Amino acid sequence: MRSEIPLWTLRGIGLALGVVLVYALLQLGIAAARVFLLVFIAVLLASALEPMLGWLRHRVSVLSRAGTILVVYLTFIVTDAECEELIELVRREHVRLFYARIPAHFGVINPDAKDPPEAGI
């Protein structure tokens, strides 16, 4: 009976460490959920790029690969109204995000106190 005490002690320690590890991974996943969402959207856009390139190059044979990529990227550009709507959605979710707009408009959503105030360009 006493010979099993170290064995069960090690099993208990292993169980406790496993529970702590699972809890820590869950907390990390919850904390990084917004990052996971952005990566998911980026992967979706990237996975849509190659089929669109192939379809365009098959249909319009005069475009080079670079020209086709330019056409596809232009389809990802949004209007000013759509951009404002997207920025407002990010602002409501309290996500700190740096962005750039063309013509040359840069800004920080939900800035830190140490960030300089936004100046018009």
Image (cartoon, rainbow, N blue to C red):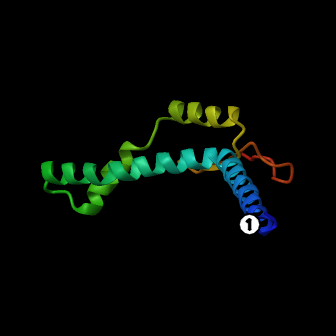
Nearest the camera: 79 or 76? 76
| Secondary structure of residue under mark 1 | helix
How many residues crowd mark 1 within 10 Å: few (<14), some (14–19), many (20+)? few
Where's the N terminus, which quadrant? Answer: bottom right
Q: Identify whether 10 is placed above or below 55.
A: below
State the residue lying farthest toward the front: 1
Residue 102 screen position, x and y as percent: 53, 48
Q: Mark 1 points at which residue?
A: 7
Q: How many labels does the image show?
A: 1
Nearest the camera: 50 or 26? 26
**Residue 118 vs residue 47: left or right?**
right
Instruction: Name the residue located 81 percent from the left edge and 52 percent from the top edge.
Output: 116
Instruction: Name the residue located 33 percent from the left edge and 54 percent from the top edge.
Output: 70
Residue 4 screen position, x and y as percent: 75, 65
Q: Is residue 101 visible?
A: no
Nearest the camera: 21 or 15? 15
Q: Is residue 52 visible?
A: yes
Q: Tell me the kind of residue under disc 1.
A: Leu
State the residue lying farthest toward the right: 113
Residue 50 screen position, x and y as percent: 29, 54
Nearest the camera: 109 or 116? 109
**Residue 52 vs residue 18: left or right?**
left
Residue 99 screen position, x and y as percent: 61, 49
Q: Identify whether 65 is placed above or below 85.
A: below
Q: Identify whether 27 is placed above or below 66.
A: above
